[in-house]
Image (spheres, helix red, strand yellow):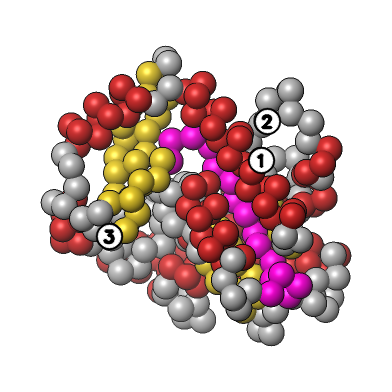
Amino acid sequence: MIKKIYTFGTSFTQGGGFEFDVMPPKYKKIYEIFDDEEQSQENFSYPGQLKKLLPNVEVFNLAKSGYGNERMYRKAIDLVLSDSFNSDDTLFLLEFSYLGRKEFYSKKLKDFIVVNYNNVENKSILNGYARTYRQSQYLSDKDISKLPSNDFFEKFVEKTFDENIQVDLMHFNNLKFLSFLNERNINYLFTQKPMMFPTRVNLDNYHIETHEIKTFRNSSFLSELDETSIDYETEGIYSDTHFGLSGSKYVASKIFDELIDRKKIKGNKLNQKLSDFSYIKKKIKLNSGNIL
């Protein structure tokens, strides 16, 4: 049986959209009607909801908005190599991301930052850079003041990021990371599996399919995003594509059932459908007059 779960990934795992400490009061008010839900990003994330379903398992959310695979490699490997780590009773839930999330270390901040970019018509274009996104303007400005200018990062991305090279590096690093986990006999499941690998790579030794969560096997836990988003459950009052409360509850329930099937925990499956959480949207709609 597992005793600890660590989740890794992007804002979809961290609980993006529910940064209550900096959220406009109008949006906070939407979710105040759920008085049995603590207004914190941790609680409104799927790991936070999973924690409620697993009172006898410690759940640690190590995801961070804007960051991607490189942070996941770093945090997971640090854990595995720590003296107190026990692979037998620990499970990793891994949300792999695609390109556009390059991590660097800032000597001035004494911390990691992430540079986010898009590839458009074979050109890499800067989207932004930060130590932490969606924090107070004061803290953001303080961080940015210690970093090179936007112009520096814009030119750096334009002159050094080649999409084909970055794709190859991502594939290579993903394979190294999976090899490390397998060699150490780490228990892990994909909430979003690694993006496509080159056809020349033989994946038989990696047993990708054995680490897939049944519900998300054909794509990822993002596959039903349209009906699990904050935008959907608030009917556009709060326009945000991250998981809403219903989405977080749904994802948590499916992971719970998977753990039962795999005999990682004891209990009875929930067998919940997305429609079982439609009461959240209905309750928000009924109270929309008090929100607007």
Q: Which mark is in front, 2 or 1?
A: 1
- For numbered disc 1, what is the local secondary structure? helix
Measure how far apart labels 2 and 1 are at the Cα level.
Answer: 9 Å
Residue 110 numbered tag: 3
| Range covered by the magenta-colored residues | 86-101
- For numbered disc 2, what is the local secondary structure? loop
Q: Earlier in the sequence, mark 2 or mark 3?
A: 3
Q: Earlier in the sequence, mark 2 or mark 1?
A: 1
Measure how far apart labels 2 and 3 are at the Cα level.
Answer: 34 Å
Q: Which mark is in front, 2 or 3?
A: 3
Residue 11 numbered tag: none
Q: How many marks?
A: 3
Q: Position of residue 64 (x, y in %)?
A: 44, 57
Q: Quadrant of the C terminus?
A: bottom left
Q: Quadrant of the N terminus?
A: bottom right
Reply yes or no: does residue 90 show up in magenta.
Answer: yes
Quadrant of the image occupied by residue 87: bottom right
* Residue at horizontal 61 percent and vertical 35 percent from the top: 172
Is residue 232 or residue 143 the one in the foreground?
Answer: 143
Q: Earlier in the sequence, mark 1 or mark 3?
A: 3
To which residue does mark 1 refer?
A: 175
- The image shows residue 158, relative to residue 82, as above or below, that is above
Reply yes or no: does residue 105 show up in magenta.
Answer: no
Question: Horizontally, is 199 left or right of 245 in the view?
Answer: right
For disc 1, the neighbor class at 10 Å (few under 14, some 14 to 19, many from 20) is some
Is residue 281 or residue 47 the one in the foreground?
Answer: 47
In the image, what residue type sits under mark 2? Phe
Q: Position of residue 284 (x, y in %)?
A: 48, 63
To which residue does mark 2 refer?
A: 197
In the image, what residue type sits under mark 1? Leu
- The image shows residue 274, relative to residue 122, as above or below, that is below
